[in-house]
Image (spheres, rainbow, N blue to C red):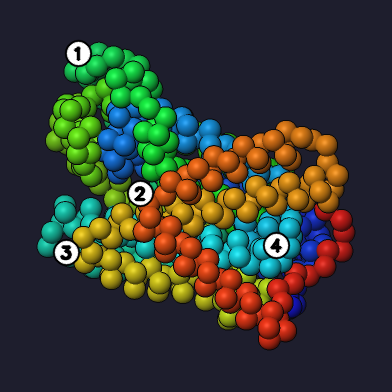
Amino acid sequence: MSSPSAAPSSPASSQSAANGVERFGYQQQLQRSLSFTDLLIYGLIFMVPIAPFGIFGGVFQGSGGMVALAYVIGMVAMAFTALSYAQMSKAFPMAGSVYTYAGRGIAAPVGFLAGWVILLDYILVPALLYLVASAAMASFVPVIPVWAWLIMFIVLNTAVNYFGIQMTARINKIMLVAELIVLAIFLVVGVVALAQGKGHGDAFSPIFDSSTFTWPLVFGAVSVAVLSFLGFDGISMLAEESREDARKLGRSMVAALMLAGALFIAQTWVAALLAPDRAELLKNGGDNAFYDVAEYAGGHWLSVLTAVATAVAWGFANSLVAQAATSRLLFAMARDRLLPRFLGKIHPKHKVPVNATFLTAAVSLVLGLILANSDDGIGQLSSLINFGAMTAFLALHVSVVVHYVVRQRSRDWWRHLIAPAIGFLILLYVVINAKVAAQAVGLTWLALGVLILITFILIGRRPTLPDETEVSE
C-alpha cells in the first residue's frame, strides 16, 4: 500500500538515511540536524519541567498529600515504557512512534490501530495546552479574552514550526532555560521558607503518610501524575530528524524521563511541606493550589511568577513541541496511505510536514474554541489524552515481545520480556481505572478505527508497509 515519495535526500544526510529510513523502503525527506542534546531538551520541554505547578492541587488531593510518592511511582511506571521505546526505536529508527513500532514489530493493521489510538492523544494534547494557557493568561489580562489568547498562541507556534525543526530546537533551548530559572527561584525561596519554620507536617509526609496511605488512593493519583510524563515518547517522532545513532534516540527518552521525574519530585516535595492549609487541600484540591503555596512561601510576586511561567510553558513551549510531534505522526501515517496523502507533503525549503502542521493548528483552534466555553473542558481533554496514550503504550509493550522474543529469538529476558510485561500490567491498571467518560470516548474512537481498518481491507487496501532492504538487529 505504501507509496513513499521519491524526493532525494540531501548529501549531508545520505549516510544517516542509509542507516535509517532507506533500508525500510523510504527516502529521507526530513532534515537530519538534531543532536542528542536537542532531543533531550525536546523531551524535557514536552514534559514541562514545571508541569506540577498547574496540577499540584489535584494530585495532592488524590494522593492524600503524598504527592511526591505519586510522582515517584509515575516515573517508575513510565520508565518501563521508556525502556520499551528505547528498544523499538533502535530496531525501527523512523517517525511515527507507536504506529511504526506496532506496525513493523507486530503487523501493519495493528500498527494502524495503535497509530489511530495514540492519534487521539496527539491531536488533543495541543488543544489542551492552548486552552490551559489561554485561560491562565486571560485571568491575568482579562481585557484579552480566552479565545484571543488561544489564537495568538496557535499562530505563534505554527509560525515557529513552519520555519523548520532547527528553529523549533533553538526556541526549545531558550524556553528550557527560562523554566529552569523559575523552578530554581521557587526551590530556593521554598527551602528558605522551610528553614524559617514555615513548613507543615513531617518532612517525609509527601512521600509517605500513614494516616492517608492506601494503594488505590496512590494509584488513583498516579493516573493524574502520569499526564506530566507524557512527552518523553514524543522524542521518537523525531527519529528521522536526528543525526545521532539510533541507540541515542532511546537513551535521550530515558534520560529526559529521569531528569523530569527528579524535578517533579523535588518541587512537589517542597510545595507539599509548605501547603498553608493541608486539610482544605486534601478536601478540595484546587487549580491555584501551587500558586497559593508560592505566595505563602515568598509573597505575591512569586505566585504571579509561577502562574505566568506555567501559562507560557504550556501555551507556547509545550504546545510548540506537541504540534511538531503530532504533525510527524500524521506525516508517517499519510506516507503509508493510511491518512490522506496531502498530509505527507514536505515543505521543499524548511523540510517539515507543512500540511500536517497546519491541520494540527486548525484542529487545536476548533477544539479550543469549543471547549473554552465548557465548564470542564480541561478535565475532559486530560482524561481522554491519558486514555489514548496509555492504550497505545500497551501495544508498544506487546510489540517489543513479538519483535524481539518471537521473531528475533532474543534471550534478553529483562529488556525484551520482563520489563515490557511489567510496563503492560501497570498501564493496564491505569486504563481500567480511568474515568468512565474517558473509557467510553476512547473505546468509541478505537471502534471507529476498527471500522476504518475493516473498510480498508474490504476495498482491497489492507495496510502494508514497505519491505526492509536489510534485516533489523
State whether residue 227 appears in this view.
yes
As drawn, 328 above or below 105: below
The amino acid type, in three-letter code, at marker 4 is Gly
The amino acid type, in three-letter code, at marker 2 is Ala
- Classify 10 Å Cα crowding around label 3: few (below 14), some (14-19), many (20 and above): few
Q: Which residue is mark 1?
A: 197
Identify which residue is drawn at 35% across, 24% down.
Answer: 213
Q: Is residue 410 left or right of residue 273?
A: right
Q: Secondary structure at mark 1?
A: loop
Q: Secondary structure at mark 4?
A: helix
The amino acid type, in three-letter code, at marker 1 is Gly
As drawn, 69 above or below 375: above
Q: Which residue is mark 3?
A: 144
Q: Is residue 231 left or right of residue 375?
A: right
> Which is nearer the eye, 292 or 215?
215
Q: Which residue is mark 2?
A: 313
Q: Position of residue 187 (x, y in %)?
A: 32, 27
